[in-house]
Amino acid sequence: MRALLFLLGLGIAGAHAQSPATYEGQDRQEKLLAGAKKEGELTVYTSGQSDDIGAVAKAFEAKYGIKVSLWRAGSEKVLQRAVQEARGGRHAVDVIETNGPEMEMLHREQILQAVKSPHLVDLIPAARRPHGEWVGTRLNVFALAYNTRLVKKEELPKSFADLAHPRWKGRLGIEADDQDWLAGVMAQLGEQKGAQIFREIVKNNGISVRRGHTLLTQLVVSGEVPLALTVYNYKAEQFKGQGAPIDWFSIGRAVARPNGVGVARRAPHPHAAVLFYDFEISEDGQRILAKRDFVPTNRKIDTPLNKMPLELVDPGVMLDQHDKWTRLYEELFLKQAR
């Protein structure tokens, strides 16, 4: 009987043992670090550019001596791989880092877990989700970008309606999957008025549709697309800083959505995963992102972009309204593009 009670006691104790994600004791950091040192590594699935998220990973490795393996693909492929592996019972990923709508889908697929990080209090409200299973690390700000050798600053449109002017014929480009940008713009213009404006632009001047924001930005730099409607401002800023003939601007409030990070519910290296999560949203990690021209979500990091007027798109709402905005985006741009 005593042996049975002892075993039952062990079972009860084990059942109440907290995971690294939810532990909030005074020795939280020490426990995380000790556990992460034993694990020795972690795997991150990310849609971030290798040199951007790689800079965060490199700093993390230097600080903690824990190896980070990065697997990079587009946000849709990151989502697809994480979901397929989870459904197949293969638990290879520790941390997932990608666009807000895909992160929200991972939450709904029950692939992520809530993390009680002490750094959460430092984040802007838009970075935090009610369920706590992922958090925004930075804002992706959509901007218009132009080739400074081919477009004069005084020619830049003051409104989207200005893009229907004949001077823009054959000179415009847009990314193939920016439904969330469209939703943010329509919130400012009104759906009926906005749809009419973009129909007029495409009818009069055509638009080149390209897949990939980095590619679209590169095409602005090369001059193949003199003016693009939807690049990420950080990538244009990076190219500009390297001396490329590119600059960016916004019309109205720039549309922004959070990019996020989450810890897999069945992470094979749970301590290292939570330690990386903490690092990316801490001042150290956020400062690295800010230096790479991102808009960090930690309020302790001050950048000029933090003061920009933004139209924030809610990833959960975008997920719920995905079909609506996809249909409209296809009608306005994909079916009419030339």
Image (tube, rainbow, N blue to C red):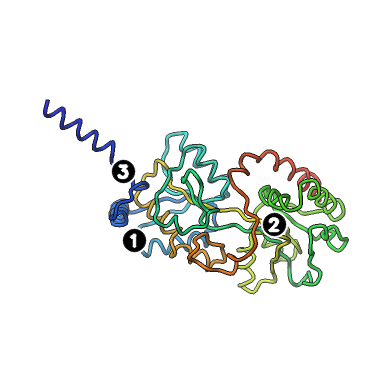
Residue matched to label 3: 18
**Residue 299 sits above or below residue 7 on the image:** below
- Give percent across and percent down for residue 9: 19, 33
Are circles 2 and 3 on residues that touch, CB within 8 Å?
no
Q: Secondary structure at mark 3?
A: loop
Q: CA distance from mark 1 to mark 3?
A: 25 Å
Q: Nearer the viewer, mark 2 or mark 1?
A: 2
Circle 2: residue type: Thr
Q: Is residue 307 left or right of residue 31?
A: right
Q: Can you name the residue that lies furthest to the bottom here?
A: 243
Q: Secondary structure at mark 1?
A: loop
Q: Nearer the viewer, mark 2 or mark 3?
A: 3
Residue matched to label 1: 65
Return the disc, 2 or 1, that comes first in the chain's sequence: 1
Circle 3: residue type: Gln
Return the disc, 1 or 3, that comes first in the chain's sequence: 3
- The 10 Å Cα crowd at callout 1, few under 14, some 14 to 19, many 20 or more, is some
- Give percent across and percent down for residue 281: 45, 58
- The 10 Å Cα crowd at callout 3, few under 14, some 14 to 19, many 20 or more, is few
- Give percent across and percent down for residue 225: 75, 61
Q: Nearer the viewer, mark 1 or mark 3?
A: 3
Q: Secondary structure at mark 2?
A: strand
**Residue 311 sits above or below residue 335 on the image:** below
Q: Can you name the residue that lies furthest to the left here?
A: 2
- Give percent across and percent down for residue 139: 57, 57
Name which quarter of the figure residue 246 lies in: bottom right
Residue matched to label 2: 230
Q: Nearer the viewer, residue 186 or 178?
A: 186
Are circles 1 and 3 on residues that touch, CB within 8 Å?
no
Q: CA distance from mark 2 to mark 1?
A: 38 Å
Residue pictured at 64% horizontal, 71% vertical: 240
